[in-house]
Amino acid sequence: MIILIQMKYIYKTKVSNPKRIVCLFHGFMGNKKSIFDIFTEKMADGETLIIARDAVGHNGRDGSKINWLAVKKDWDRYINSLRKRYPRIPIILVGASMGGTIALTIRLTNKNVNQVFAVCALHDLNEDTVNFQQRLRLIFASGKLTINNRLLKKLRMGTPSHYVNKKTYRNNIYLIHSRADKVVPFSNFVKNKKLFNVPKSNCRTFNSGGHYETSRRIETEQYIRKKML
């Protein structure tokens, strides 16, 4: 039986002595409940503390719709606090779509993360099917946005592409993607795989299906559960 603790910005399972922590990162159109509902059934086992959050920078929590860099920084602080409380158990990030992008970026820069699963994750902000300027306006919920190089550089600090030539943490990365994804094209998988030097054994690809909400969800959940620390 799953015991759920609900707070304003957090859903999590109640586990007395967890053997691992799984942090769930939802996508652009998602929220803590949507990602929690997708993955918890397969992962909840009485030993796994599962946490889904609406981070600062998304869903209007701080007044903005989505700001990749703000979400990353907020999760970084939260993960560091988890490590202080649980110094010896693995912290695992599972992210879908935009959430996968942020989870990968956090893995690159945060030594407190032990493992990441990224489902249909972007490599860079301008590599999905949404017009880049439209996406930037959505980020700040405003049609009056002046786009300049300084802004672009800041926003890309929340994506893996920013860290291509930097010293980072790149182990225990798992990538999952559909070749038929029409929202985040498969080319993003190829670039992330190269950046993280992900071995074939850590990749799960599908020829059919679409973006993560509709594609091969059962197989994805089973794969993650099998590979988790």
Image: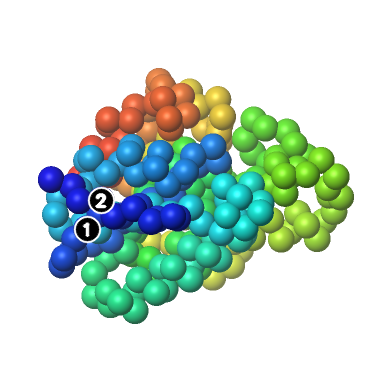
Residue lying at 22% horizontally and 41% vertically, measured from the top left: 42
136 and 62: which is toward the camera: 62
Q: Residue furthest top?
A: 208
Tag 2, which secondary structure? Answer: strand
127 and 75: which is toward the camera: 75
Which amino acid type is marked by label 2? Leu
152 and 83: which is toward the camera: 83
The C terminus lies in which quarter of the figure? bottom left
Residue lying at 42% horizontally and 47% vertically, measured from the top left: 32
Which amino acid type is marked by label 1? Lys
Q: Is residue 97 above or below residue 207?
A: below
Tag 1, which secondary structure? Answer: loop
Image quadrant assignment for residue 53? bottom left
Image quadrant assignment for residue 217? top left
Residue lying at 62% horizontally and 35% vertically, measured from the top left: 128
Q: Which mark is residue 4?
A: 2
Residue 139 x/y as whole percent: 69, 47
**Residue 192 visible:** no
Residue 176 x/y as whole percent: 39, 39
Give the residue number, with chain letter if any, for mark 1: 14
Q: Is residue 166 left or right of residue 44?
A: right
